Image: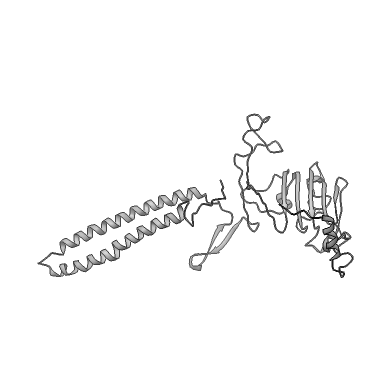
Amino acid sequence: MHKKIDAEAWLRKLENNKPTSTPSNSPFFHSDVHPAGPVFIPSKAEKIVGQGNSQIVFGRDRSGNLASGQGAFLESPTIDIVVGRGASSPDGATGTLVHNNFFADAARIYVSENTRADRNFDLALGSIGHMSPTGCSAIVLKADNTRIIGRGGVKIITGKAPRVAGFGNTGETLSTGESILPAPPIDLIAGNYTGIQTVKGPLGIGTQEIPALQPVIRGKNLEHGLKELIGLVGELWSAVFNLSLIQTGFNGVIGVDPWRPWVAAAAAPVTTQQLTSVINSLYHTKANAIVWETNYLSRAGYKYICSPNVNAT
């Protein structure tokens, strides 16, 4: 059990121990300070709730000045949760008048019924492409670092709910009424670039062009494919092993040749080499293949290629 404490007494003790050199307008120990940062220019359609440089703006879609966004010409209910306006911009000085800046503001959660988020946040096309020019609903999270934590798990799901009352035979639709693809893609994009990359060729010779955005590997399919490949390699192993046994037997026969003594003289060392260099190596290869399959393609393997916790379609 947690020990109960007297919160007020604890706060008084903390206040008494506060350094006497703390400036009067310092946020040290969560002291009350005068609001710092730029001044946001609201539109007549926006209502602001907040303190200092932390705000929740209820209004319409707006990516910049009052002429920007879908809200400049149609209804597009939007909630913009933003902190640190102009944090990385010279315009972020205290008292400066600013509009929304999706690239300089420190962090935000942007929720809109109708927006063009890909264009407004200058996002790469990916396999999904950009949103419709007419806009659609979207939620955007942006900050220096973003963390999603689920104590019971995390799911990233695209598509529609399979059974929804009131939507008829077609099922759930987009908020615009348009139909939903059976399995809309998921793009994980590092570097906000999905074009063609130029890389060095084999051994650093020349260059090659490869697509930056590529499909992820499905673990079970890869596992099955590699197991089939192991079977093919095993067939080749058996063929080479059987050939060595046949050749060894043949060498034993021609090793008895009184009319050609040089053949008999060569048969013995050749047979020895086959036993030590070929057949023995094949035994080791077979054993190594079994260990490799256990390590990489068995759930109990320490380098099992399938993740025990992350799944993708």
Query: Residue visible at 30% across and 63% down?
Result: 280
Vertical comparison of 159 with 1: above or below: above
Query: Residue visible at 19% across and 60% down?
Result: 250
Q: In front here: 308 or 199?
A: 308
Q: How many numbered marks, from 0 up?
A: 0
Query: Residue visible at 65% across and 36% down?
Result: 179
Query: How far across and down, in percent of the image, does residue 5 sit?
Result: 79, 55
Taking the image as shown, residue 247 lies to the left or right of residue 35, namely left
Vertical comparison of 295 with 116: above or below: below
Identify the colour scheme used.
Answer: one colour
Query: How far across and down, in percent of the image, does residue 17 sit?
Result: 84, 66
Taking the image as shown, residue 159 lies to the left or right of residue 229, namely right
- Res. 37 visible in picture: no
Q: In front here: 47 or 137?
A: 47
Query: Residue visible at 56% across and 53% down?
Result: 214
Taking the image as shown, residue 274 lies to the left or right of residue 65, namely left
Q: Quadrant of the C terminus?
A: top right
Query: How far across and down, in percent of the image, does residue 117 sit?
Result: 72, 49
- Res. 276 visible in picture: yes
Q: In front here: 238 or 129?
A: 238
